[in-house]
Structures are given as structure tokens and as C-alpha cells.
Amino acid sequence: MGRHHIHIPGFIHWPERIAPQEIDAHVHIIDWFPTLAKIIRFQPEPRIKWDGLDLSPLLFEKGSLPDRDLYWIWASNINRWALRYQDWKIVQYGRGEPKQEDWQLFNLANDQEEKKNVAADNPERVKELHERFLVQLSKDLK
């Protein structure tokens, strides 16, 4: 099905506040809302339960982010579903909610290009990530 990995660099230029550095953390577009709100000291009323994380510790304190699920759904000509947790990622193409047996599994520590589907060799990992996917999907359905 072609490439299904995402590697998009981000750049921030704020010489007075952020020291030049390279950050190798896995972030998601949804992280920018809570980050920008924190930076400008914006607190919406009523309070919002952000989907993303505040990236300020990475930018200003050389901190780190907790392990978490990164979750995607693309609804287009080719529907794609994906979830990444740590070095593992599941991907499925097609319409309809993926079943556990539908997933492709990639170990991104060993296969950043996502060329070798290792789902058949790792059924417990697929099950674990599928369960994580269902938790994320349930948040979308609320």
C-alpha cells in the first residue's frame, strides 16, 4: 500500500526564549494547542480537556514527554487507521473499524521505513496495541 509512516520536522524560532537545540521526541499536531495556551497563559472557560500534551517542558526545560499513544485516522480515498506506542505502530487501510486481525505491525526501532509487517510474529503486541486503539477510538465517539 505504499508508505504509511510520518516524519515531519518542526521548527520553532524564538531566540529570546528557546535555545537552539534538536529535540527527538514524538509529538502530534494536537500538542500545539495546549502548548500555545500555556505559553500565552490562556485558560479557556469552561476548561478544555486537551487531547494533546503541553510541549513546554521540551522547549524550555530540556524535559521529556511521558509514554503515550499517538493515534490517527485518515478519512479519504484510502482510509487509514494507525496507533503508535513507544517503538511499535499498527496500521490498517480500509473502510470500517479495524479488527484485531486486520492490523499491520511495525517495530519502528528496527524498521523506520515500515517495510516489514511483523504482526504474524507478534500477536500479543498486536492485541495490546489494538486494545489501546479501541480506547482512543472510544474518546472520538463520545
Image (cartoon, rainbow, N blue to C red):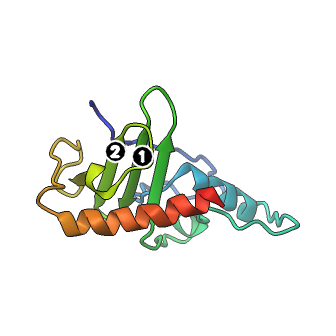
Identify whether 52 is placed above or below 12: below
Q: Which residue is mark 2?
A: 92
Q: Position of residue 131 (x, y in %)?
A: 39, 67
Q: Position of residue 12 (x, y in %)?
A: 57, 47
Do tag 2 and tag 1 residues touch (Cβ < 8 Å)? yes
The image's mark for residue 103 is none
Residue 103 seen in the figure: no
* Number of numbered discs overlaid on the protein picture: 2
On the picture, is 31 further left or further right than 44? left
On the picture, is 73 further left or further right than 2? right
Res. 121 image quadrant: bottom left
Amino acid type at image mark 2: Gln
Residue 45 seen in the figure: yes
Q: Residue furthest left?
A: 121
- Nearer to me, 70 or 12: 70
Amino acid type at image mark 1: Trp
The image's mark for residue 81 is 1
Quarter that holds the C terminus: bottom right
- Nearer to me, 32 or 129: 129
Q: CA distance from mark 2 to mark 1?
A: 5 Å
Q: Position of residue 105 (x, y in %)?
A: 24, 53
Query: Which residue is depicted at the point 13% across and 56% down?
Result: 120
Query: Which residue is depicted at the point 23% across and 44% down?
Result: 114
Res. 59 image quadrant: bottom right
Query: Which residue is depicted at the point 62% across and 52% down?
Result: 15
SS state under label 2: strand
Disc 1 packing (10 Å; few <14; some 14–19; many ≥20): many
Quick one: label 2 or label 1, which is nearer the N terminus? 1
Query: Which residue is depicted at the point 56% across and 70% down?
Result: 57
